[in-house]
Amino acid sequence: MLRVEDITHSYKSGNEWTSVLHEINFSVKKGEMVALLGSSGSGKSTLLNLMAGLMKPTEGHIYIADQDIVKMGENKLAEFRRKNIGFIFQAYELITSLTVRENVELPLVFQSVSPRARKAKALALLEQVGIPDKADLFPSQLSGGQQQRVSIARSLITEPSVIFADEPTGNLDSKTEEEIIGILLNLNRTMKTTFIVVTHEYKVAEQMQRIFTLKDGFLVTESQAKPQADIKLQKEPQLETQTEVQVEEQIAEEAEPQTMVEVEEQLAAGAEQEAVEPVPQTAGADEDPPAEEPEHQTAEEADPAEGGKP
Ligand SMILES: Nc1ncnc2c1ncn2[C@@H]1O[C@H](COP(=O)(O)OP(=O)(O)O)[C@@H](O)[C@H]1O
Ligand SMILES: [Mg+2]
C-alpha cells in the first residue's frame, strides 16, 4: 500500500545543499504497523513528512495506494491527503480555541458530512481512545497523554488508509507512553489501519511488526516481521468497531453536499443543531466554554506543513 522508491532528499541552507536522505527504498503492506527508528538527526521526520506529502523529495517516488504522490499537483495532493492520510504529531498540534470534540471533527469540516454525523463520529472515536468524558473540554484542560488521545482520534476521523506518527510519545512519561502505544497497537489490530511510527526508542519500535532503522540518512536495517503473538497489547481502551459501522451508516444517510466554508462557521452550525437535540453527555456538556478567547489559531497555522520543526 506504500512504496518508497529511491528517495533522496537535500535541504538548502544559504548556498549549501545538505543531503539528509540517501536512496531510501522500502515498502509497507496494507494493515501493517512499522517503526522508523533512528537517533536524532538521522532523517526520520524528513522521511515521514515526504511520505505524508507535506513536502517533495529531491529525487524518487512515493506510492500510496498505487498513486505516486511526488508527481501530484498541489490541489490533487491536498485532496489525496485529506482522504487517505492521517498524521499524529509529537506535540499534538491541537487548536486551543476549539473543544476536544471540535478538534476531532476538524478534518471532516472540509468534507461533505453533516454536522450531526460529524459529531457522532467524533464522540465514538473519543470513546475508542478512552476519553469519552472530555469531549467538551479545551485542550489546555487535558494532560499530555489525553491530548495525544485527542490527536489520535482526529487522525482517524477521515478513516485514512495510512497514519503517520512522528514521535507520538516523545513528550510523554513512560507510563503514558505505554498507554498511547497500546492504543495505536489496538487500533491497528481492530481497524486494520496502516501505521508508520517514528521513534528514537527501541522499546517503542520493538512492539511494531517491522522496524526500519535510519542512520545518517541511510536505511541500514530492516528487521524481520514480528509474530503477532509477540506484540504487547495494553488493556485499554475497549474498541467497539460496531459503533464505527453505525456511525458510517448514519453518515451515508445524512451526508449532504457542502461547500468549503470557514471552520468556525461550520462548527457553529453544529452547535446550533446541538441546541435542538440534547445529547446525553457527562458533566460539563451544557456549560459555556471559557469566556476568554485563547490566542487565535487558524486551521492554516495548524497545518502539518508548518508544524513542529525543531
Ligand atoms: N528544514 C530544514 N532545513 C535544513 N535542514 C534540515 C531541515 N529539517 C531537517 N534538517 C536537517 O536534516 C537532518 C535530518 O533531520 P530530521 O529529519 O528532522 O531528523 P530526525 O527526525 O531523525 O531527528 C538533520 O541534520 C537536520 O538538521
Ligand atoms: Mg524528528
Image: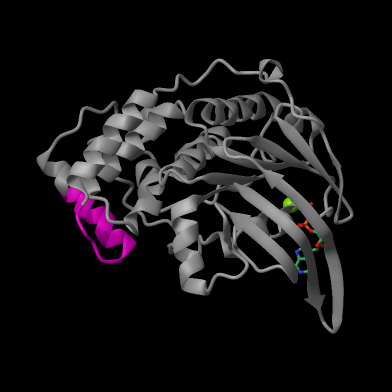
Q: Is residue 299 left or right of residue 119?
A: right
Quick check: 87 above or below 211?
below
Segment tinted magenta in the rendering: 256-272
Residue toward you, 42 or 172: 42
Residue at the spot x=51%, y=35% of the render?
149
Residue toward you, 162 or 120: 162
- Tell me how the rendering is colored: one colour
Residue toward you, 44 or 126: 44
Quick check: 188 above or below 236?
below
Residue at the spot x=56%, y=45% of the render?
163
Q: Is residue 288 left or right of residue 201?
A: left
Give the position of the C terminus as an image quadrant: bottom right
x, y percentage for residue 26?
A: 75, 48
Instruction: Note whether residue 175 is visible.
Output: yes
x, y percentage for residue 9?
A: 78, 66
x, y percentage for residue 301?
A: 50, 65
Q: Residue furthest bottom?
A: 15
Residue 266 lies within the magenta run: yes
Residue 239 lies within the magenta run: no
Instruction: Note whether residue 308 is visible.
Output: no
Quick check: 74 above or below 236?
below
Residue at the spot x=36%, y=54% of the render?
292
x, y percentage for residue 179?
A: 60, 25
